[in-house]
């Protein structure tokens, strides 16, 4: 599977995300919305944006690994938060967590502020798309 990062000169230089990623080969993995639920379905760290962000990434990592991929196979993430101000106030800490999971690679991303999420006490949820290597024949 090949990935090509697209950075059009007519757009501002991306920081912490990529404008587009063109892929060739591989299998498409559609990642359902993951919140900060633990294995028992309970939201971890109520009120803590950074801890919930990390749990969400841990949950996404579990799904991608189940498909035989890595976090660097994620090409698109939609981030939903119930508090954009809280998200922005924690941007440096969130970036540190993001770098720990993605090792300097960034998917194409969008951030949406929403009124609420399905789980009570959930501050953040992410869904996305990964392209993982084709399975051997």
Image (cartoon, rainbow, N blue to C red):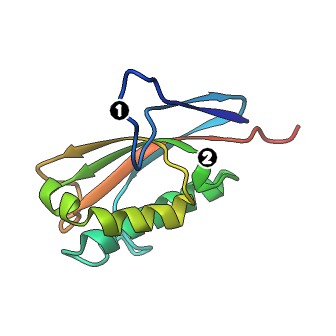
Q: Quadrant of residue 46?
A: bottom left
Q: Position of residue 110 (x, y in %)?
A: 32, 40
- Lower position in the chain sequence, tag 1 or tag 2: 1
Q: Can residue 18 be seen?
A: yes
Q: Position of residue 61 (x, y in %)?
A: 54, 60
Q: Position of residue 79 (x, y in %)?
A: 32, 48
Q: List the single residue furthest toward the right.
A: 137
Which part of the image, by quadrant, shows the C terminus?
top right
Q: Position of residue 41 (x, y in %)?
A: 36, 70
In this figure, which residue is indicated by the disc labeled 2?
73
- Separation of residues labelled 1 and 2 (CA atoms): 24 Å
Density class for disc 2 (Cα within 10 Å; few <14, some 14-19, many ≥20) is many
Q: Is residue 71 left or right of residue 7?
A: right
Label 1 secondary element: loop
Identify which residue is drawn at 18% across, 74% down: 47
Nearer to us: label 1 or label 2? 1
Above or below — where is 1 with respect to 59? Answer: above
Which part of the image, by quadrant, shows the N terminus?
top right
Q: List the single residue furthest toward the bottom.
A: 45
124 or 105: nearer the viewer: 105
Q: Is residue 45 left or right of residue 77?
A: left
Density class for disc 1 (Cα within 10 Å; few <14, some 14-19, many ≥20) is few
In this figure, which residue is indicated by the disc labeled 1?
12
71 or 125: nearer the viewer: 71
Number of numbered callouts drawn? 2
Do the residues under discs 1 and 2 have CB atoms within 8 angstroms?
no
Identify which residue is drawn at 49% across, 57% down: 60
93 or 70: nearer the viewer: 93
């Amino acid at each position: 599977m090949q990935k090509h990062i697209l950075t059009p000169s007519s757009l501002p230089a991306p920081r912490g995300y990529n404008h587009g990623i063109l892929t060739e080969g591989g299998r498409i993995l559609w990642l359902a919305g993951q919140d900060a639920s633990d294995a028992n379905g309970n939201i971890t760290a109520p009120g803590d944006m950074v801890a919930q962000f990390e749990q969400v990434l841990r949950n996404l990592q579990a799904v991608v690994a189940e498909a035989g991929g890595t976090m660097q196979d994620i090409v698109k993430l939609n981030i939903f938060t119930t508090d954009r101000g809280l998200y922005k106030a924690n941007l440096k800490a969130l970036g540190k967590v993001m770098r720990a999971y993605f090792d300097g690679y960034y998917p194409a991303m969008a951030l949406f502020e929403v009124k609420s999420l399905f789980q009570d006490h959930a501050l953040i949820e992410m869904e996305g798309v990964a392209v993982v290597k084709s399975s051997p024949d």
